[in-house]
Image (cartoon, rainbow, N blue to C red):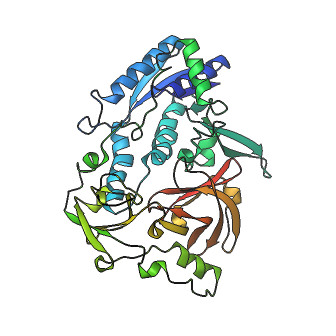
Amino acid sequence: MKIVVGLSGGVDSSVAAYLLQQQGHEVIALFMRNWNDASVTLEDECPWVEDSNDALMVAQKLGIPFQVIDMSDLYKERIVDYMFAEYQNGRTPNPDILCNREVKFDVFLQTALSLGADKVATGHYARVDSFESENGGQTYCLLAGKDTNKDQSYFLCQLNQEQLSKALFPIGDLTKPEVREIAKELGLVTAEKKDSQGLCFIGKVSLPTFLQQQLVPKNGEIVEIFNDFPDFHRGSPQFASKLEELQYLSAKTKYNKEDGKVIGTHQGAQFFTIGQSKGLGIGGHKESCFIVSRDMEHNIIYVGEGRDFPGLLRKALKIQNDDVHWVREDLRLKNGESMPVQARIRYRQTLEKAVLYQFEDGLYMEFDQAQSAIAEGQFAAWYAGDELLGSGVIS
């Protein structure tokens, strides 16, 4: 089988290429050059240059063909511009998920297929399985990686059946220490290389500095909301239907400046996210203050003290129908149907028990336990055991 490996310059994709080679496949390494602006990276050198050199050295060590493809314009159009737009509108995007959907398993995949490849492989800690469906075709399953500390299935939550049918994740059955040990034994230059902590393929950046390339700073006020805010103490009303209850539970709490006290200023609500505590410049509190809401129209940030502040917590969320994505289309809910699942609303979050409810106006996710810092624009993903069934953008 001819397989193109997305060789990123890290240890994970390096070992993925080696494992495929050991299995007897014809392996070609492709390095994607994506958008980079050195003015906002925190490293001294442009990260893609170092990564490209490392990827080349790995390919030479393994004796496999190596090519670089420039996808910087595409990446800026589909990922970077999307990020700017989302933050401008008061939402919290996840560029890594979009990178996998729009770049790696779209244009990059098509490029690989045009080179005669049968499949594309990456260094994700995830797995793909399949079974024969009733119509005689194959149904593909996206499974969590065996290493629960590194499972990256969440980042792949927007892939579809066609993309999964062409995807391989060779290190999905390994742990990170096992991957590093293989790289050491082979003498790969990436064996001790630290994992990337930055935005997908951009490098480690200062997010406010990055956003200020296009989003103009504008002074605004920070308003603290206190525990005695009336909405926190009202009892739950009687509901005429489950839909009415879910609409109530998923609704964001609305604050006005008069509901709290001005305790500071900021340079723009668009530079912050729900649940953020760092970078606010707030002192004089026993516990950290966390952002609970942003008023984009009036450029006001609302905060509350402590991780257990009531304004941080919500029991349900809503996903607009157009933003609902099922990896397993055969399990898609019809109007009026529900499904018990396990779910997460951010990477590395422990899976939480929840129930999905599909109604005409959208998909609702109700958790057993209230969740902290549910943010518009982020992705909620749902699982059955270790299989990721679907995902959607939180509205």
**Residue sitting nearer the eye, 370 or 362:** 370
- What is the total number of numbered labels drawn onto the structure image? 0
Q: What x and y, as percent, mark residue 296? A: 30, 68
Name the quarter where the N terminus is drawn: top right
Left-right relation of 111 to 389: left
Left-right relation of 111 to 72: right
Q: Is residue 121 above or below residue 350?
A: above
Among the 4 quarters of the image, the one containing residue 333: bottom right
Q: What x and y, as percent, mark residue 330? A: 71, 57
What residue lies at 36% left-to-right and 76% top-to-bottom?
A: 255
What residue lies at 46% left-to-right and 19% top-to-bottom?
A: 66
What residue lies at 23% left-to-right and 50% top-to-bottom?
A: 212
Q: Is residue 160 above or below residue 150?
A: below
Left-right relation of 328 to 123: right
Residue 113 visible within the image: yes
**Residue sitting nearer the eye, 301 or 12:** 301
Q: What x and y, as percent, mark residue 153? A: 59, 44
Among the 4 quarters of the image, the one containing residue 344: bottom right
Q: Is residue 361 above or below residue 163?
A: below
Left-right relation of 173 to 249: right
What residue lies at 65% left-to-right and 17% top-to-bottom?
A: 22
**Residue sitting nearer the eye, 340 or 103:** 340
Q: What x and y, as percent, mark residue 169? A: 61, 33
Residue 63 visible within the image: no
